[in-house]
Image: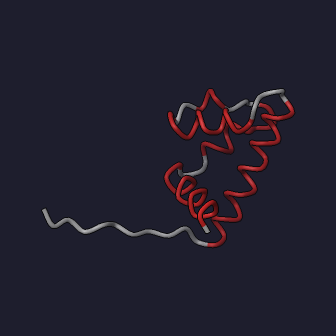
Amino acid sequence: MTESTIKFSVPGDDKENMCRILRTVFDALQEKGYNPINQIVGYLLTEDPTYITNYNNARSLICKLDRDELLQELVREYLT
């Protein structure tokens, strides 16, 4: 098996949009009394949008993000 690894990167504008959406979702979850970290992790692990509240359109917003790209960016930010 000599399969090549696929490489992709997130454009700068997408990174800013991801950050803005993630912050909006975080704030909405916090305002509704949820633990935002736990809820976002639950969503990222399962891709089940019911982990995210509908409040302030948060569920719709997070569903606009590509989960793989979001995970990639989160890992990059944590490790760099």
Left of 26 or right of it: where is 66? left
Q: Quadrant of residue 26?
A: top right
Q: Residue furthest right?
A: 31
Q: Residue furthest front?
A: 79
The image's colour scheme reads secondary structure
Counting every numbered tag in the picture gives 0
Q: Quadrant of residue 28?
A: top right
Question: Residue 63's x, y, as percent?
Answer: 60, 42
Q: Residue at x 67, y 57 (%)?
A: 18
Above or below, 59 against 10 in this view is: above
Q: Residue at x 63, y 63 (%)?
A: 77
Question: Residue 69's x, y, as percent?
Answer: 53, 57
Image quadrant containing the C terminus? bottom right
Left of 69 or right of it: where is 22? right
Above or below, 41 against 22 in this view is: above
Q: Residue furthest left?
A: 1
Question: Residue 25's x, y, as percent?
Answer: 74, 42
Q: Residue at x 77, y 50 (%)?
A: 23
Left of 24 or right of it: where is 62? left
Question: Residue 59's x, y, as percent?
Answer: 68, 36
Above or below, 75 against 12 in this view is: above
Image quadrant containing the N terminus? bottom left
Between 66 and 73, the one nearer to me in the picture = 73
Left of 4 or right of it: where is 55? right
Q: Residue at x 64, y 29 (%)?
A: 51
